[in-house]
Image (tube, rainbow, N blue to C red):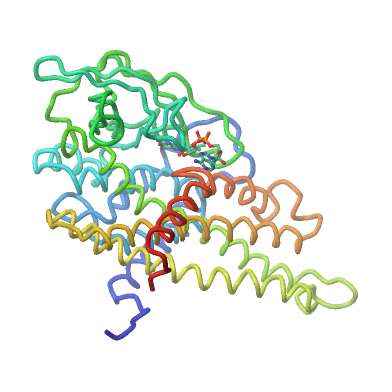
Amino acid sequence: MALDFSFTEEQDLFRQTVREFIEEEVRPMLPRGFVEGHEFPWPIVRKFQKQGLMGVPIPREYGGAGMGEVGYCIMIEELAQLDASIATIVGAHTGICVQPLYLFGTEDQRAQFVKPLAEGKAIGAFALTEPQAGSDAANIQTQAVLDGDEYVLSGTKIFVTNGDVADYLMVSAVTDPALGARGGVTTFIVESKREGFKVANVEDKMGIRLSTTAEIHLDGVRVPKDNILGKVGEGFIAALTALDGGRIILGLGSLAGAHAILNRTLQYVKAREQFGEPLGKKQAIQFTLAEAGAEIWALRMACYKAAQDCEHYYEMVAQGKSVPRPFRDQVSRQSAMVKVLGSECAGRTIDKCMQVYGARGFIEGFDDLEVAFRDHIISEIYEGTNDVQRLIIGRELYKLGELPV
Ligand SMILES: Cc1cc2nc3c(=O)[nH]c(=O)nc-3n(C[C@H](O)[C@H](O)[C@H](O)COP(=O)(O)OP(=O)(O)OC[C@H]3O[C@@H](n4cnc5c(N)ncnc54)[C@H](O)[C@@H]3O)c2cc1C
């Protein structure tokens, strides 16, 4: 098969449209520097909703833009060059809430939940993490007890992106404590308007301050059996499938943030002169920026390759086809790889650029370096820490006894 690294005409046009929308309509609205308080940026999110950008990978008949996982990556890459918080809001909504609801939902659930979410008429969130269950997600304690035709959910979810504003949340809960993660966890679609649903706290964070992160209390929330996503006892399948795509988005999104900073630095070193010439003429500066450029260029392609495979995987899941285990493992492994490499490359690049800027890189608000520095750190932590991704990759490689190409 011929190798083809080019985007389709439709994808190029989509990138251009998203870029113009972001530059003309969103950039002027974005607060810069350290943002006080934790208010969900409704005016900006409403723009994305109106523009039809809250369900990019979802087929058009379910309210989305029908651009698949690669199209979704294109949109996030453009968005993350502008701001990591807004990319986080859209990513939590689209990638880890709407996408699994579409992939595993019944036709009724697609009509009831996916359509309004993808059309931008509602906000979604993904609630897996609990106080004692972070990396060890299998240790969740939220209980779902069957009572007639309803399940009664009780427990605490923490660090839920969009949790304070979401209309619908994908909530993992234990339905059979004896079975644990393998067969004992079920995913429920929970409407935040239900009695017993409470936003207990919104976190104060060092970065991505425009994105809100909430603690949710479920105090006897009753949801109908019809709100089960997929099958009883198979809750982790939906969560893990969502995270495969989510991690590619995180890898590419953090790279895109670093790419924007690198571009700004390339302009800065032309303008700033020391010892009678632009900084950019110094070989040491060129080496630093060359290394960053090479890493971003190579990893960006790796992200799109991972996205292309993930798109194919998601298409098979959506059509109810059985996915061969080696292919599923390949998608998960590639997602973990680009999440680790993309987020860590972003950290290195932003740090290098700050050094190239010298003192000005340390000044609040100067060329957005401080915001980028604060924002990038979380991408090494959420959706599974980078060491947990290394565990996934390492176990796979050990099992296979080789690195498949
Ligand atoms: C801003 C933000 C937004 C978030 N959004 C969401 C969301 O929308 N939905 C959601 O469900 N969650 C969300 N999270 C939670 C996030 O995914 C978890 O914080 C993350 O998975 C890590 O869990 P933890 O913080 O409990 O770390 P811990 O599990 O306590 O890990 C701490 C350290 O120990 C290491 N470690 C743990 N286990 C192992 C091991 N077996 N081997 C080696 N090292 C190990 C980790 O790598 C890490 O370095 C969010 C978190 C933040 C901060």
Classify residue 25 as left or right of residue 66. Answer: right
Is the N terminus in the top left, top right, bottom left or bottom right quadrant? bottom left
Could you say which quadrant of the image residue 149 lies in? top left
Q: Which residue is at 79% across, 69% downward?
A: 272
Q: Position of residue 271 (x, y in %)?
A: 75, 71
Classify residue 52 as left or right of residue 393. Answer: left
Classify residue 372 as left or right of residue 158. Answer: right
Q: Position of residue 294 (x, y in %)?
A: 59, 74
Q: Which residue is at 52% across, 73% downward?
A: 297
Quick check: 104 above or below 280?
Answer: above
- Nearer to us in this view, 116 or 199: 199
Q: Position of residue 251 (x, y in %)?
A: 47, 57
Q: Position of residue 158 (x, y in %)?
A: 44, 27
Q: Is residue 122 visible?
A: yes
- Nearer to us in this view, 6 or 343: 343
Is the C terminus in the top left, top right, bottom left or bottom right quadrant? bottom left
